[in-house]
Amino acid sequence: FSIIVFLYGGIPFLRMGRDELEDREPGMMALISLAIFVAFTYSMGSLFLSGSSSFFWELVTLIDVMLLGHWIEMRSVRKASGALEELKELMPDTAEKITENGTDEVRVSELEEGDKVLVRPGDSIPVDGKVYDGESSVDESMVTGESKPVDKSEGDEVIGGTVNNEGSLRIEVTATGDETALSGIMNLVEEAQKSESRSQKLADRAAGWLFYIALGSGLVTGVAWTLAVGFGLTVIERVVTVLVIACPHALGLAVPLVVAINTSMAAQNGILVRDRIAMEEARTIDTVVFDKTGTLTEGEQSVVDIKAVSQEDEVLGKMAAAESDSEHVIAEAIRNEAEDRGIDIPESSGFESISGKGVRAEVGGIEVHVGGPNMLEHLEVKKRFEDFVERSGRKGRTVVYLVEDGEVRGAVALADRIRDKSREAVKKLQNRGVEVAMLTGDSEDVAASVAEELNIDTHFAEVLPEDKDSKIQELQNQGKKVAMVGDGVNDAPALTRANVGIAIGSGTDVAVESADVILVKNNPKAVVKLLNLSDLNYRKMLQNLFWATGYNALAIPLAAGIAAPVGVMLSPAVGAGIMSLSTVIVAINAQLMRRKSINP
Ligand code: AMP
């Protein structure tokens, strides 16, 4: 019976052990093979040669427990590293393609660019696309980490794998298969999970040593017991137990499991880690440099202040009406503000653009002008709101006036608006003891006012794109560990230079080569999350390495029979059980990471 169990149940271990030896990377399987091989030959030898003692019972239980342990291990490991599967499952299998006579249910893989698809309320969006009809909100949290649903209407882009809420959307397919954002994200996650990290190398090396430590311990145990009680069954039993218990399996999994879970937690929060070393280093960052435009600010002009002789809304409505034909960024900002405030925009006609000065139109039958200081000169009207204009100027804002009946009736100040989330992000970073700096090509006035508003310690203004990376170097020369947050386009050299380069969200474009980390969503708060994840990553790795090596340090002497004088002797099967248990503990400890909150 033992021969059958050895040949059937033991073969997988022997085969894998042989592979390890062939690759000159002896490890766990080589040790197990050695253990069962020793047990088997000894027993066969004693059966045929002396016929006295044999070891068959122990051999069989050892192999059985090992198989069972291995099976349990595989299960918990698969559960821990199933992050990619979770992402894959976001994509539905079928879609409702819109045809000439209604809709057709087709496989998502059959969709092509330009096809039109209907997404019903509650359905997952099957591909990347652009909405051409319908209004709804979409839950994009699985891709961007942003919990608030995002409103979508005609012209908006949607991401495959996200979930449509209350309305129907008709979308035109813009990307399928490997081209979609989710595929890009999955590739990055896979790459990051594979990318070697420093702690991984350390653990691998330790696991390599453990093979020789196990071999050495086995040898010492054998010699010591032979000297003490003479060669016999006990000696073989001890040696086999030591070999089995010293298997470095837990150590081999300690780091990869943490990496797998950490990377997927990051991805679920819209943080894509391209380089694992960056994730390990992030927790040591003491300075975060933000590129201002498009990162701390919205990156486009908007109305940030209004002054009016009458109702603000009335002034803004008239201005928006006069601007309704203009393509100028100022016109767009004014129209957006009016729309955001839900103002009824009055009828207007007779548009005329006065180049370099502004616009003229008739609003409600009355002639109005909207324009900058040049316009006031041109119309020869008296200046007004000196305080407002002076204050805005100091902050580097652009002022545009509304002129009606030959007098200034209102004015708006335009600036690149600071994101609400920037304030929180800066504060949270400072609370962590991280210094925050800002980098911009804008004038000193603008930079200083933004820095002041955000309470940022250091700012660099009027920096040309090509000089951004030398500013980073300057900080590094002061002994600082710097993370740079930018848009990944004109910041590329600075992102590369920084200890950790973070490219901030372009939504679907995740292929920013120069960055170590990509934030899917344009939200500076994710930087804080990244640092929290890095902390968590480090803690879990340490814990796991402790569990894996600590177990060996304790269990090997016990297996060797150090406690024999007080009557404690581990059998090989119990040894195998403990070995598997340590792996399961490491896997569960890694799993527990998911329970931790990384929200700033
Ligand atoms: P531009 O050379 O087109 O950028 O315009 C120069 C200045 O003219 C701007 O800074 C504004 O003060 C004013 N201006 C131009 N177009 C407009 C417009 N559509 N609405 C208000 N002001 C404008």
Image (cartoon, grey):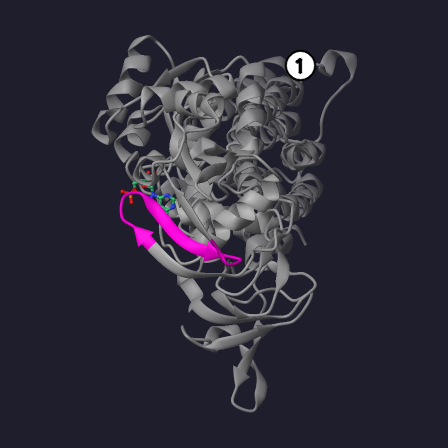
Image position of 427 with respect to 264: above or below: above
Residue type marked 1: Ile
> Quarter holding the N terminus?
bottom right
Residue 486 location, x and y as percent? 38, 33
Q: Residue furthest top?
A: 478
Q: Is mark 1 on a helix, strand or loop?
A: loop
Left or right of residue 415, residue 353 in this image = left
Residue 183 location, x and y as percent? 45, 57
Q: Can residue 273 be seen in this view?
A: no
Left or right of residue 342, residue 197 in this image = left
In front here: 287 or 255? 287
Residue 202 location, x and y as percent? 43, 25
Residue identifier under label 1? 562
Examine the image and state in which quarter residue 285 appears. Answer: top left
Residue at (53, 12) in percent of width and height: 433
Task: Judge whether residue 362 is colored magenta.
Answer: yes
Image position of 78 with respect to 432: above or below: below
Task: Judge whether residue 196 is colored magenta.
Answer: no
State the predominant SS element of the stretch in magenta: strand
Image position of 67 with respect to 152: above or below: above
Q: Is residue 28 visible?
A: yes
Residue at (46, 76) in percent of width and height: 111
Left or right of residue 356, residue 11 in this image = right
> Quarter holding the C terminus?
top right
Examine the image and state in which quarter residue 395 appears. Answer: top left
Range of the magenta residues? 353-366
